[in-house]
Image (spheres, helix red, strand yellow):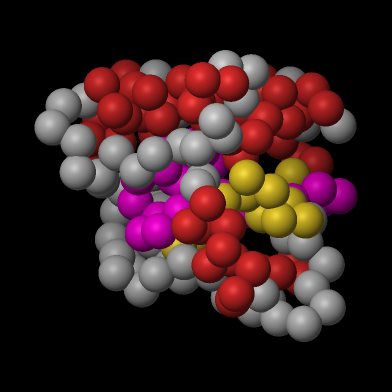
Amino acid sequence: MSKSALFVCLGNICRSPIAEAVFKQLVTDRGQAGDWLIDSAATSTYEIGSSPDHRGQALMRKKDIYKNVEKHRARQITKADFENFQFIFGMDDSNMSNLKRMAPKNYSAKLLKLGDFDTDKSFQGIIEDPYYAHDDAEFERVYQQCLRSCTAFLDSL
């Protein structure tokens, strides 16, 4: 595996598992699955050990990508992740500042905001947390943002 990507959000149960599932599907569809190590993690300890949010699971099942994260359990990012992953993607400015604060000295990963790759600039690079959403529309929006962003990132390589 020559390339690696880690997707990070606050709890690792909503946005980052969706981004992980989307990215895994995209590289599989491009015949590049064997070239990539792909995972997701949290900046917090809130949800360690939890499965993806049930609304996110429902969305991923509908999009036929849940198979990519079926065994997912939330975990917190580790110092080793900053060395083991080439690209670490945060979902919003808070994630990015947490990642920079948590990073060890002289880490090798590139810290990137996933939404900066979104071709729809109306979101200003932010993939908002859908956890407190009152309907499934927020999870659909996260999925669409992740799909556009991951596609554009892969196209940029």
Whether residue 45 appears in magenta in the rendering, the answer is no
Q: Magenta segment range?
A: 1-28
The residue sitting at the left extreme is: 134
Looking at the image, which residue is at 79% across and 23% down?
155
Q: Quadrant of the C terminus?
A: top right
The residue sitting at the bottom extreme is: 105
Q: Does any portion of residue 84 appear in the rendered image? A: yes
Q: Position of residue 3 (x, y in %)?
A: 81, 48
Q: Position of residue 95 (x, y in %)?
A: 51, 57
Looking at the image, which residue is at 77% across and 62% down?
109
Looking at the image, which residue is at 71% across and 23% down?
152
Q: Does any portion of residue 25 appear in the rendered image? A: no
Whether residue 20 appears in magenta in the rendering, the answer is yes
Q: Is residue 46 left or right of residue 69?
A: left
Q: Is residue 99 above or below residue 17?
A: below
Q: How many marks?
A: 0
Q: Is residue 157 above or below residue 13?
A: above
Looking at the image, which residue is at 57% across and 34% down?
125
Q: Position of residue 18 (x, y in %)?
A: 44, 37
Q: Position of residue 48 (x, y in %)?
A: 34, 69
Q: Is residue 88 above or below residue 53?
A: below
Front-most of residues 1 and 108: 108
Q: Is residue 64 left or right of residue 47?
A: right
Q: Is residue 101 left or right of residue 153?
A: left
Asked which quadrant contains residue 80, the reply is bottom right
